[in-house]
Image (cartoon, helix red, strand yellow):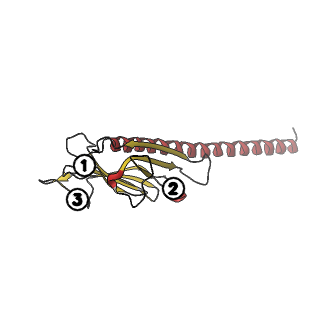
Amino acid sequence: MTLVEVVMVSAIFGLVMFALGESIVSLYKSNAYTMAQAVQVQYARRGVQTLVRDMREMTYADDGTFPLARMEEHLIGFYSDIDRDNSVEYVEYELASTTLVKRTYNATGSPPTYSTTTADSVQILSEYAQNRNQGTSTFYYFDANGNPATSSALVTDVRFIRVQTIINVDPVRDPGQFMLRGSASLRNVKL
């Protein structure tokens, strides 16, 4: 082989190796994003399942307060025995920015009272919920007739709650967003 042939073979080999290396790096970046999206969707799915389970067990507070305490577009507060210890806790689920958070407050004293200044436990359920960024509500409230409850409605009128979260690790990349939905009727409410 001549020197020119060796240089040409080396150049072609170098270009092929460069193209192959870039393809592998691109594949790993794409796969990493897809895996991150899948992991966050799974976390959010567990969070929505927990939320729906807790809402279905909504009950009157230890001090007799109505089960649903707060109903906002991105925040719900209610009483439920979430840890099955025969003592009802006050629970708040809130979408703050892109983070879905669960806060639990235990009753103290006799007669029991609930202080919401410091949560007894805080759990992050998802860090990539895009509801606020897309102008979509997280919680929807309905009365006994299935009509949407307005912001001026009383919490005592609500009988059905729907939750939806839009999960997307990076809103400008594909694969797009995932919407998770759940719902619960207030089963333990006396009409």
Q: Tell me if 18 is positioned left or right of 160 in this view.
A: right
Task: Tell me which amino acid carries mark 1.
Answer: Glu
Spatial CA span between label 3 and label 2: 30 Å
The label shown at residue 115 is 3
- Please state which amino acid type lies under the numbered disc 2: Thr
Residue 42 x %, y %:
47, 41
Of all residues, the one furthest to the top in this rendering is 1
What residue is disc 1 on?
A: 89
Mark 3: which secondary structure? loop
Q: Which residue is pictured at 65% across the width and 46% down the height? A: 26
Using the image as rendered, state which of residue 30 and residue 79 is in the foreground. Answer: 79
Q: Position of residue 12 (x, y in %)?
A: 80, 43
**Location of residue 16 (image quadrant):** top right
Q: Which residue is mark 2?
A: 136
Q: Residue 9: image x %, image y %?
A: 82, 41
Residue occupying image coordinates x 39% and y 42%: 184
Q: Going 39% across and 61% down the picture, which residue do you hit?
A: 152
